[in-house]
Amino acid sequence: MLVLMVSLGITFSMGKGSSLIAGFNTLPEEEKEKYDAAALCKFMGNMMFTLSFIVVLWLISVVYEMDWLLYVGIVLFIVITIFILIYVNTGNRFKKG
């Protein structure tokens, strides 16, 4: 799972893979042209790297039996998920012009 997340992060960071972003891939072509797909992909790439880091924290917490690290990872996951939902779904951050 971690390898998949990092691979998606690399793909998105290169500005590619917009067809893998839920919601964006279902838009009609004329609507897609209104958005900066490369900027959206780069943002999602950064988020994938961040979520991958959180998964690494979870793995470390299991291997070294550090419960507090698991809780830190859970809190970070919730905060990042809320940030993604608010940042992407409010305003027109990725619209052209």
Image: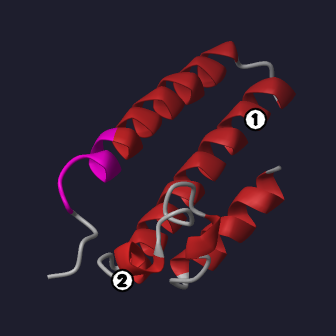
Was residue 89 drawn as part of the magenta stretch in this picture?
yes
Q: Nearer the viewer, residue 4 or 19?
A: 19
In the displayed structure, does residue 43 sit left or right of residue 87? right
Q: Position of residue 68 (x, y in %)?
A: 60, 16
* Screen quadrant of the C terminus: bottom left
Marker disc for residue 45: none
Picture layout, residue 85 above or below residue 24: above
State the image quarter where residue 10 is shown.
bottom right
Q: Which residue is mark 2?
A: 33
Q: Nearer the viewer, mark 1 or mark 2?
A: 2
Disc nearer the start of the sequence (1/2): 2
| 74 relative position to 59: left or right | left
Asked if labels 2 and 1 touch by Cβ distance under 8 angstroms, the answer is no
Q: Position of residue 27 (x, y in %)?
A: 47, 65
Residue stretch in magenta: 86-92
Q: Residue at x 33, y 52 (%)?
A: 88
Q: Residue at x 34, y 79 (%)?
A: 36
- How dense is the environment of label 2, judged by Cα within 10 Å: few (below 14), some, or many (20 and up)? few
Q: Position of residue 51 (x, y in %)?
A: 58, 47
Q: Where is residue 66? Give x, y as percent.
A: 71, 19
Quadrant in the rendering for residue 35: bottom left
Q: Which label belongs to residue 60? A: 1
What amino acid is found at the position of numbered circle 1 in the picture? Ile
SS assignment at label 2: loop
Residue that sits furthest to the left in the current view: 97
Residue in the picture at 73% in, 69% down = 7
Identify residue type, mark 2. Answer: Glu
Q: Is residue 15 left or right of residue 1?
A: left
Q: Is residue 25 above or below residue 38?
A: above
Of 5 and 28, which appears nearest the observer?
Answer: 28
Determine whether the residue tagged by mark 1 lies in a helix, strand or loop: helix
